[in-house]
Image: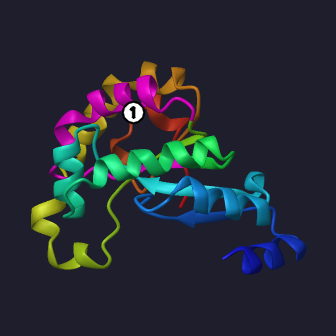
Amino acid sequence: LASPINILIQKGIRGINILSNGALLRRSNLREFSSQVDPRKVLWCIPLYSHLPSIHDNIVVSNGAWYKTLEGIQNLHEEGFSVQIRFIPLKQNQDSIVQYLEFINSSLSFVQQLAIMGLEVTGYAVHNLSLITPDYTHVVAQLSQSSALLRRLPMEVNLFNLPLCLLPASLHKFSRNS
């Protein structure tokens, strides 16, 4: 993985985003990787679906995944890598967005970015839309309720793929084209 990243960086790419579930990111592997690639050039994008282990594990269909993901995020931080937490509102996690954001603020305030991303209809989502599609009015209401917290978070906050017609003015500053 290090060789292609270094080639891209040598060709002028400023940085690389790596999407991972974070579950297998061990300190020893990351230490070796950081000796081969400048950690400042890599942003690790890790989905964390809930502040509650049971909900995250249910969504990813893997018992213990929440703890492994948090361990991976902590390992990335300790090895000097930048981390983006990705939160995708789904039917299963849409009722606890306020608590999720409070958890991010209290427990993961060291990450560089929080990306809240509307559902993209690809992969497994195509055949499971009725089971996973959130009520975006409800999602936006919770985000709006948390707008003061979103402004206070010590990280960059971005909203992607959320219906702009539903976003109140208090959330516009976080909305990004995607």
Whether 107 is drawn above or below 130: the answer is above
User: Which residue is rendered at x = 81% and y = 69% of the image?
Assistant: 13
Q: Is residue 87 magenta?
A: yes
Snapshot colouring: rainbow
Going by the numbered disc 1, the residue's amino acid type is Pro
Measuring from the top left, give residue 155's x and y in whole percent. 58, 33
User: Which residue is rendered at x = 77% and y = 60% of the image?
Assistant: 35
Whether 26 is drawn above or below 124: the answer is above
User: Which residue is rendered at x = 17% and y = 61% of the image?
Assistant: 132
User: Which residue is rendered at x = 73% and y = 54% of the image?
Assistant: 39
Q: Is residue 56 magenta?
A: no
Measuring from the top left, give residue 5's x and y in whole percent. 74, 74
Image-based side of 70 in relation to 131, left or right: right
Measuring from the top left, give residue 148's x and y in whole percent. 44, 19
Image-based side of 27 in relation to 15, left or right: left
Structural crowding at the residue carrying mark 1, measured as other residues with C-alpha within 10 Å and reported as few (<14), some (14–19) or many (≥20):
few
The residue segment tinted magenta is: 84-110
Q: Nearer the viewer, residue 71 or 143?
A: 71
Q: In which image quadrant can residue 80 be found?
A: top right
Residue that numbered label 1 is attached to? 168
Image-based side of 44 in relation to 115, left or right: right
